[in-house]
């Protein structure tokens, strides 16, 4: 996708983003979330903090990092709104749900759910977090609908480790959560 294509979608993009803007209590979160989405859709090859900041016109990645790590917003409410949008715009009686897991390679042991485990993504056993994703697919295309962290049994049984990783007590335990 080229930046000119993003410009052609500006009105649709603003309408889409306006559905999620109320989830952010402060104007900075609303503004930065729109910029962040725009950056994710941009044609830059590596979407790390600095490249995204440059693509969206920020001098540093600080504002996006605040959005992702400290801004208060309800991820489940965002998921619910996305599902409503997909139903309204892409709903198709022939559409199907697809469940798949993806492994995220990790170097340390502190990330929630990380352990040496097999990942089909890489086809080998390494230190991974495993995410389980639900997508919706039609002839028009596909989109994510939901996500869950797979929490290995060793994490379910280790209250201190869960606390250190900030896994809430009400987090469902035992397999995909």
Image: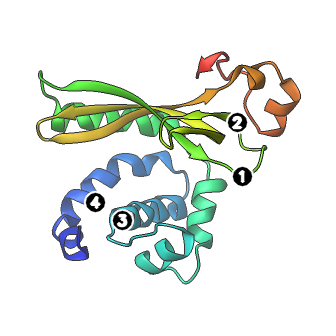
Query: Label 1, on which residue?
Result: 107
**Residue 172 place in picture, x, y as percent:** 64, 18
User: Which of the marked residues, 1 or 4, is nearer the chain's N terminus?
Assistant: 4
> In 3D space, how far apart are the residues under numbered discs 1 and 3 (Cα atoms)?
29 Å
Indicate which disc, 3 or 4, sits on the residue closer to the N terminus. 4
Q: Position of residue 111 (x, y in %)?
A: 72, 43
Res. 116 mark: 2
Q: Quadrant of residue 176?
A: top right
Q: Which residue is mark 4?
A: 14
Please say if the residues under marks 2 and 1 sit with CB atoms less than 8 Å apart: no
- Circle 2 Cα neighbour tier, 10 Å, few/some/many (<14 / 14–19 / ≥20): some
Q: Residue at x 59, y 33 (%)?
A: 118
Asked if 36 appears above or below 114 in the picture, the reply is: below
Q: Looking at the rendered structure, which numbered label has been put on residue 131?
A: none
**Cα distance between the residues tagged 2 and 1:** 10 Å
> Which of the two labelled residues, at mark 3 and mark 2, occupies the earlier sequence position?
3
Say if mark 1 contacts mark 3, CB within 8 Å.
no
Position of residue 115 measured from the top left corner of the image (x, y, whole percent): 72, 35
Instruction: Give the residue drawn at x 17%, y 36%.
Output: 90
- Distance from Cα at disc 3 to Cα at disc 4: 10 Å
- The local secondary structure at tag 2 comes to strand
Foreground of the two, 72 or 55? 55
Whether residue 113 is visible, yes or no, is: no
Q: Nearer the viewer, mark 3 or mark 2?
A: 2
Q: Which SS class for mark 3?
A: helix
Lower sequence index among marks 2 and 4? 4
């Amino acid at each position: 996708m080229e930046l000119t294509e993003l410009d052609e979608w500006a009105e649709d993009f603003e309408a889409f983003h306006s559905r999620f803007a109320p989830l952010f209590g402060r104007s900075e979160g609303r503004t930065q979330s729109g910029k962040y989405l725009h950056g994710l859709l941009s044609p830059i090859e590596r979407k790390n903090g600095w490249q995204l900041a440059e693509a969206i016109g920020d001098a540093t990645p600080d504002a996006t990092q605040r959005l992702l790590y400290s801004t208060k917003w309800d991820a489940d409410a965002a998921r619910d709104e996305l599902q409503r949008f997909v139903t309204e715009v892409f709903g198709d009686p022939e559409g199907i749900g697809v469940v798949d897991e993806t492994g995220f390679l990790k170097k340390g042991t502190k990330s929630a759910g990380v352990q040496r485990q097999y990942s089909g993504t890489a086809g080998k056993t390494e230190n991974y977090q495993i995410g389980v994703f639900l997508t919706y697919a039609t002839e028009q295309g596909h989109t994510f609908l939901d996500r869950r962290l797979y929490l290995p049994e060793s994490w379910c049984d280790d209250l201190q480790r869960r606390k250190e990783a900030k896994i809430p007590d009400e987090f469902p335990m035992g397999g995909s959560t």
